[in-house]
Image: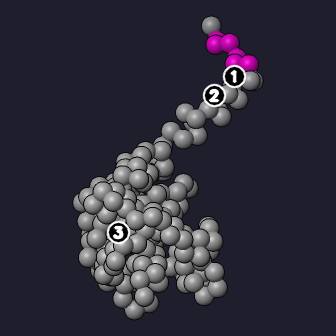
Amino acid sequence: MSPLPLPSWILALLLLSPMGVGAAEQVFLEPGRFLRQAFDGDPPPPKVLWLTGERRKQVSRILGHPPPKLRVRYWLRGQRSAWILEEIGKERPITVGIVIEDDRVVEVRVLVYRESRGHEVRHPFFTRQFEGARLKQGDKLDRRIDGISGATLSVRALKRLVRLALWLHREVSR
């Protein structure tokens, strides 16, 4: 006996349901909690950096594409800044929190991961590689970051975001 066909409205509901659209989204750390941790429980008020003119061109060079927004929010106290940035891995944005102090990476945390593969980039064994990293000539990282088999696009996205955060930090802490 063959199954009865589903009415078209039920099929549409199933295809458009959140279960199918956002099933891969995983929140590993809420952005507010990341900021509290970055600033010992007392984050400063957010500031805004506009990405226009030469700054926009440089951000485009680092990302390999124009920035998706004209402004970036950041948090700054002394020589410590925190950035919550997003970059597409393969198809969906990866939200990453990055703390910079004295032009060096202090911490990289994957806050929200939306891809179906490559989630290994969230683990400390991977993100610890960025600790202490700086920008060298050409706005490249001063160290090699080992990749993860099956997560190549996510690894590349995180590397771009860390380079971007280091460059943006330099812009706001002059």
Q: Quadrant of residue 101?
A: bottom left
Decide: marks 1, 2 in contact (CB < 8 A)? yes
Q: Quadrant of residue 57?
A: bottom right
Q: Horizontal and vertical percent for residue 149?
A: 35, 59
The residue pinned by badge 2 equals 14
Q: Which mark is residue 38?
A: none
**Which numbered disc, 3 or 1, marks the residue that appears first in the sequence?**
1
Name the kind of residue labelled 1 in the image: Ile
Element type at mark 3: strand
- Which quarter of the rendered picture does the N terminus lie within? top right
Q: Which residues are magenta?
A: 2-7
Q: Horizontal and vertical percent for residue 11?
A: 69, 26
Name the kind of residue labelled 2 in the image: Leu
CA neighbours of label 2 inside 10 A, class few (<14), some (14 to 19), many (20+) = few
The residue pinned by badge 1 equals 10
**Which numbered disc, 2 or 3, marks the residue that appears first in the sequence?**
2
- Which quarter of the rendered picture does the C terminus lie within? bottom left
Element type at mark 2: helix
Looking at the picture, the colour scheme in use is one colour
The answer to which of 31 and 13 lies nearer the viewer is 31
Name the kind of residue labelled 3 in the image: Val
CA distance for labels 1 and 2: 6 Å
Residue 119 appearing in the image: no
Residue visible at 34% across and 77% down? 78
Residue visible at 30% across and 57% down? 41
The residue pinned by badge 3 equals 99
